[in-house]
Image: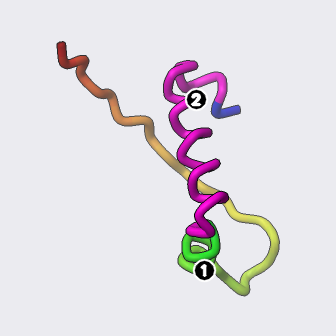
């Protein structure tokens, strides 16, 4: 779904960030931050914030 609302550059940048978090082990810290005991499903509501191009 996110691929429908994000640009290809944004997706590539976030995938690189995810790969870095996986490679450094930082993902463990991130997962602990969002840990919950309320089940396996999570409902998230988000708004995409418009950014202005700087050139």
Percent x, y of residue 6? 54, 25
**Which residue does the numbered mark 2 point to in the structure image?**
12
The picture quadrant where one finds residue 31 is bottom right
Percent x, y of residue 38? 73, 82
The picture quadrant where one finds residue 21 is bottom right
The picture quadrant where one finds residue 39 is bottom right
Which tag, 1 or 2, sits closer to the chain's start?
2
View extreme (front): residue: 24
Q: Find the magenta span and give its range.
A: 3-26
Does 24 sit left or right of 1 as displayed?
Answer: left
Percent x, y of residue 41? 78, 66
Dominant SS type (magenta) = helix
Nearest the viewer among 36 and 23 is: 23
Q: Which one is in front in this view, the residue at disc 1 or the one at disc 2?
A: 2
Q: Would residue 29 be counted in the magenta stretch?
A: no
Question: Which residue is at a point 58% across and 30% down the rendered structure image?
Answer: 11
Mark 2 secondary-structure assignment = helix
Does 51 sit left or right of 20 as displayed?
Answer: left
**Which residue does the numbered mark 1 point to in the structure image?**
32
Badge 2 density bin: few <14, some 14–19, many ≥20, Cα 10 Å: few
Does 29 sit left or right of 4 as displayed?
Answer: left
Does 51 sit left or right of 13 as displayed?
Answer: left
Q: Would residue 18 be counted in the magenta stretch?
A: yes
Question: Which residue is at a point 64% across and 22% down the rendered structure image?
Answer: 4
Give the Cα separation between the discs numbered 1 and 2.
25 Å
The quadrant of the rendering that contains the N terminus is top right
Question: Which residue is at a point 19% across and 19% down the rendered structure image?
Answer: 54
View extreme (bottom): residue: 37
Mark 1 secondary-structure assignment = helix
Question: Which residue is at a point 18% across and 13% down the rendered structure image?
Answer: 55
């Amino acid at each position: 779904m996110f691929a429908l609302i994000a640009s290809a550059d944004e997706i590539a940048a976030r995938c690189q960030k995810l790969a870095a978090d996986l490679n450094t082990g930082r993902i463990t810290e991130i997962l602990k931050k969002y840990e919950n005991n309320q089940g396996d499903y999570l409902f998230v509501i988000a708004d995409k914030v418009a950014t202005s191009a700087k050139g």
